Amino acid sequence: VWEKTFTIEGKPQGEPFWLCPQALNATPLINKEGLTATVYAIASDGTLHVMNVINGEDRMPPIPFVPPFSKNWSLNFNDGVLYTNTSQGCNNAKSGVYSIDFNKPDHPIHFFQASKDGAGIWGLSGVAISEGGMVFAGTGDGPYDAENGKFPDTVLQLSTPDLKLADYFTPANHTYLTRKDLDMGSLTPVVFPLGGREIVAAGGKEGVIYLLDAKRVGSPDHHTPLYRSPVFANEGADFAGTGFWGALASSEDSKKNRWLYVPALGAPASTAKFPLTNGAASHGSIMAFRIEEKAGQPVVTPAWISRDMNLPEPPIVAGGLVFAVSDGQFARQSKGDGALYSSADRIAKHTGNAVLYAFDAATGKELFSSGDTMPSWTHFGSISISGGRVFVTTFDSMVYAFGIKQQQQP
């Protein structure tokens, strides 16, 4: 239909590599408000482009938004404000959350820095936004010093649109999480209604689920959640390729039951017991939980675990189905001797091809598999659903659309 190549200003420091690709990294966003939908995309030099969805023409001049050649993540739009987050210190960029307010003529930009030492925010789906007008983000590892603005392994609660710190939750074992590199930054939280209030579900590489009150996530001591689950994944506390990665998903079924769906890398913990299983899941799975209230507090109850997936990307729920991709990538970062795998190493070692699955949302039963349709693999590849189609991208620069096959009428 159309394509657009952005003019890039300046040059990055150093060459790109898998941790800092120096590319158009943030998933673009389509805002359907107004007569014609608008596309938002961040070029590699940190400039925000606002385009007409029909022809790609600029709706306004490009806006310097985030640091050039930073690693920024999926865009989210709420009440006229666009959000993204940054991580990994690429091109010396600070880690934190950015917003730009399109409700005001001058489009003010706000930034909250998670820490001066690490604490990157790298959940695949960006930040989560509540109906109550709060932004939530999980942070990565680093030295903890809340009084001096250092919030590693923390769920931040920020106001909209100015990104002021409203509250925060840091697990009581945050020193252990940083020491073992089990950070909370690997997973985008999800916000949902339950019993007349909003709940934030969060977690990370530790394989633990936290439930928090969206009005005040931290409780008086900033370390006590409404609920903390046992370890469901990453029983061996491995820092790479295991635990919860990507983004959480939640839905309510026709009987008003609240569900939580979690992408788990690696085998389930030996103590994790699911009433419904769908075969061994040694490489990874989608784990499904019921969120219920007991004695006035929310709790997580295991419901089902999917078939084996190598490795699962974040799920999407639609039409009573849970859609998720098994990405086929090689997820190890370290060789075990302190050296990191190169981009070429990780590409060469990919373990299979990307496969799209559809699971029954109540049982986890496999209802569809794309099999060998997509010969390539994908890395941190979120899926999208629109117009009765499921869209998947792969490493070989292909876009696939899956839909329901129409039956021939007699």
Image: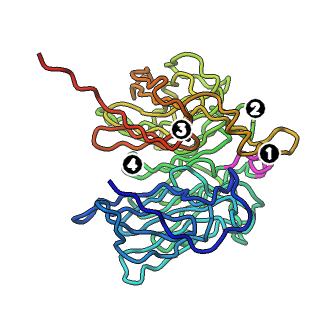
**Amino acid type, mark 1:** Leu
State the residue at coordinates (52%, 46%). 201
| For marks 2 and 4 on the same chain, the one whose residue lies earlier in the sequence | 4
Magenta-tinted stretch: 175-183
Horizontal relation, residue 305 to residue 71: left or right: left
Q: Is residue 178 magenta?
A: yes
Horizontal relation, residue 351 to residue 404: left or right: right
- The label shown at residue 236 is 2
User: Is residue 143 shown above or below 357?
Assistant: below
Q: Which residue is mark 1?
A: 340
Q: Which residue is mark 4?
A: 193
Q: In this figure, what is the number of numbered marks?
A: 4
User: Is residue 174 shown above or below 205?
Assistant: below
SS at circle 2: loop
Nearer the observer: mark 2 or 4; the answer is 2
Q: CA distance from mark 2 to mark 1?
A: 20 Å
Q: Is residue 391 magenta?
A: no
Q: Which residue is mark 3?
A: 313
**Amino acid type, mark 4:** Pro
SS at circle 3: loop
Nearer the observer: mark 3 or 2; the answer is 3
